[in-house]
Amino acid sequence: MVKNYAILLVIIFSGLLQFSCSSEETYVPIQQSAATSPVIFNPEATPFNTLSEYHFFEGNLKDLSPVLGVLPYQPINSLFTDYAHKKRFIWMPENQKATYVNDYSILNFPDGTVFIKNFYYQNTLPNNLPRIIETRLMYKSNEGWKFANYIWNDNQTEAYFDLSGSYTDVTFIENGVTRNTTYRIPSAAECFTCHKSEINSIPIGPKPQNLNKDLAYADGVKNQLQKWIEIGYLEDNLPNTINTVSNWQDPTSTLNDRIRGYLDINCAHCHSQDRHCDYRPVRFAFGDYQGEVSLGVCVDPDTPIAPYSKIVEPNNIARSLIHFRLNNTQEEYRMPLLGRTLIHQEGVILLEQWITSLTQNCE
Amino acid sequence: MKKPLLTILICLITFLIKAQTNSNSCLDANTDTAIVGPGVFTINGIIDGTEIPTPICAANGTGATNGEWYRYIPTNDYTVTISTDLTQNSGKDTRLHIYSGTCGNLTCVAGDDDSGTNFLSIAEFNVIAGTTYYIAFDDKWNDSGFDWQLTEGAVVLPPPPAPVTFTQQTLPTTGTNRAVVDMNGDFLDDVVAVTATNININYQLATGGFNTVNIATTSADFTPNWSLAAADFDANGYTDLLYGAGQGVTFMKANDTGTGFTEISGSEYVFSQRSNFADLNMDGHLDAFVCHDVEPTVYYINDGNGNLQYYQSTVGTAPFNLGDYSSGGHYGSIFVDYDNDGDSDLFIAKCGGEEARRLNQMYRNDSYYDASNTLVVNYTEVASQIGLSDPMQTWSSSWGDFDNDGDMDVFVGASSGSHKLMRNDLDATTGIVTFTDVTAGSGVLDMTDTGIENVTYDFDNDGILDLASNGNILIGNGDMTFNLYTSILPSAGSFGDLNTDGFIDAFSSAGSIYMNDTTTNNWITLNTVGNVSNINGIGARITIETALGSQIRDVRSGDGFRYMNTLNTHFGLGTATTITSLTVEWPSGIVDVILNPTINQTLNIIEGQNQLSLDEFLLSDLILYPNPTTHSLNLNYENHLLKNTEYSVFDMNGRQVLKGILNANVLDVSNIQSGNYILKIISNGNIKAQKFIKN
């Protein structure tokens, strides 16, 4: 009886909350209950032509107000994609749950799991309006993970299936800086290039190392993994401690921890075993870390580009190839290879601080 | 008494050694005391002299804003070492230039950026007594002062230089440097740099030097960040360009006066890697091919009017599957006739991901004329059959006949890991090809650098192909072994002949000509002009015979990874003074033969103008039987046993349809269509021909 009251309270509360793109840090609460999720999702069927057909959201579609069973989540670090914001949700079929593998691996998700990732800019010109660009789905069918992508119309009332890849120009203000980008909406092949292990598609973010943080739900702040357990999305067998990445933006963490967090989410999807660029002598994944050499410190680059002597030359930004790659917009040189056309100024500053902090002499 | 004298002496010596202070310019150094012997010298404070050392005698180019200068006049001949690699300089980053000559007209003697520990500098050079040298440091990396040391030692003769050296010259360009190729049909290699809205061409002048022209273009949807290829695909006499970008492909089609370009940008998503022009369907018109990093490869078929139709391997009505791995891994495409059957095959260097994705591929062209005399073109992937299906990590390969035995060998340059050198062991009697790994002991592994740019030329014109790999040269010895000379060429750039002296030069991506200092060897340069075949003669096989033996080349557009190199065909001849015969086997099957062409010149060869008439060789002493035949022909030539005898079979249109080596007096003709043919053999230098009918 007490429990039912609580659910009722939550439902009333969520109705009062006006959810919009601007409230990125606050989410409507989700409760698994006797009620059934209104989501319509068949992982074995052809994706719907429109986003609204899945019933992931209620009310105005552009408010991205999740229905019962569609749970917001945030990884600790996320890939830089030309300053786009991302609003993420996960949904699972009834009575299905993910299981823990280890701190560094994606959870073992049940068939029918859907990740819903909305890419938007908060303040686009000329009218200082938010604009949702695309909603990417990644879902697990009995043949493995698959992609679907929905591109939003101009008046933000619907998004339409399109996996062929396209461009859209965006002018936006972020941190007080006005920037232009010809935003790339990826094709299926581009999705796969980053989201792959050998011939299989895989998610990148949802690993315990990257989910183990508190999130402000409408019914209070809670650790995400605990929340997932609570609503039945994750089996309750986590270890007592989880080796967790540092938030690259967290000034209270060490520079080494911050850069590891940054490089893990921005670089490891290619530079890991069986990935697109597995052959380069770097291993940026958080769980692959064997010391600074994993990040390229004092490591010779395979492809010589003058005057960069090492991938990371300690205390020498001007000779560090990684800095040239990250502080570059020329597509044959820039890293990451996909997903960015602008320089991530804040990331480059962190990289510079870290390189400058290194003191060893390379032999 | 003794002690004060010692003190004075020490002071005096110290004074002598330390007296020479840094000067702000070359001219200031002339008025300051010259260094005349060894010592340790100090630049106090910061490098703030106003004269920036120039020319730059060390690596890593421009960027300095100040310099410090010294004058040095040795009292004897020495081998001198200048070093900043001193313990007190730990953590500093210096750069050094040493000159002879006079202020304002200085010549580099030596220089160094980073040969010392970390980023300190060491240079060693020989000096002549009484000559004035200038020693200058710049602030390219760091402006803080430091100590440096000059030591004098007995003269050490320098090691013999590489068989070929290059002298750098600057050539200002606008845009991204991508090509050394003739653009205006005069067969002189030009230098091409591009931006999205401009094509900057430095036209080579017959009188030497360049004429710079900028041709504005509409804004290209895609720019050649990943590769550029060039050829005259609309056959109007002016070279067209292909820009391979990370998200698509743009063609720039030159107009009929070469004064403007029409942009043609495809809407298709292509993550371009190496691009090429080649006649994929062998219809006489150049098609374009682009490796795709993350999908099957794409190509553009020419309709004969310069219009290109897009296809992607395995998709829809694509006529050919050429590089069909679903998630790509296609990096370095190169067209080569590896099996000597007269048509171009396609090798793709591959990289990244699971083993199946990165197995190198060879698409064998199995073209033939069917019963209705229609050419049928098929490609079959055969890498595993011939020993080239290798999961190494590579972005480009160099194809050439490194041992001059008449077939194309390959150096597969590692992008990561170890390079591979594979010898083509083609059996000309059976036509069966196997490649043998001859990497070990070949000298190519002396090159520990990896990279993405690998091409082959005969840089020293000794008649043996060399390799250029990421700035290094491997000088070929003609027996599948090479000697390494490091850091001679730019690590990335284009190749061609920028002063038409018959020696291959380079143009660096950074904008410097590397002009070949030449040798005394002879050479010939050939320009192939097709008419039945494509206008550039791409895909033609050229063979020359000299006293040193034979050499072969294939005409191609698109080798290495990113850049475009000359379309001209270049042979070094070594000391040979005559070419006994020069044969061009065109993709059409037409064969032109030129006897005793003049050497040390450029020769234009127009398809079909030097076809060998076989009528005069139709002699009764070559008897073929049975005639007509269905399967095989027996040969009787004055009862000679025919061993190691070259043969060719021509149809009545003069097209070569079959060739190889006879090792017995019998020839299998079962695979050619019914019709009338002429068999040509070369026995002991004598050409013999006879007609036969295939039923």
Image (cartoon, coloured by chain):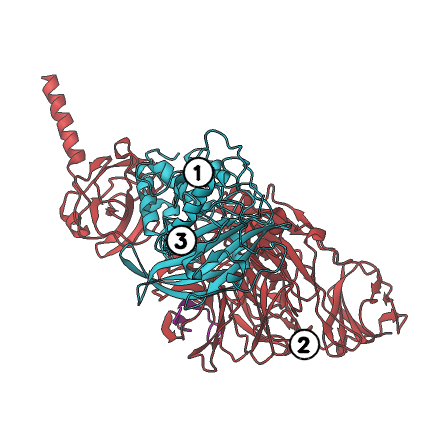
Discs 3 and 1 lie in a common subunit: yes
User: Pointer 2: what residue?
Assistant: B611
CB of mark 3 within 8 Å of CB of mark 2?
A: no
Q: Chain of mark 1?
A: A
User: Magenta residues?
Assistant: B183-207
Check chain identity for marks 2 and 1: say if they share one.
no
Identify which residue is drawn at 32% across, 65% down: A125
The tint of chain B in the picture is red
Q: Chain for mark 3?
A: A
Examine the rendering and report whether any part of residue B160 can be seen.
Answer: no
What x and y, as percent, mark residue A227?
46, 40
Question: Residue sitting at 37 percent across and 36 percent down?
Answer: A257
Q: Amino acid at mark 2?
A: Gln
Q: Is residue B193 magenta?
A: yes
Where disc 1 sits, the SS reads: loop
Q: Are discs 3 and 2 located on one and the same chain?
A: no
- Residue A15 disc label: 3
Q: Is A211 located above or below residue B259 in the figure? A: above
Q: Position of residue A118 (x, y in %)?
A: 44, 56
Name the image quarter holding the N terminus of chain B.
top left
- C-alpha separation, residue under disc 3 versus residue under disc 1: 28 Å
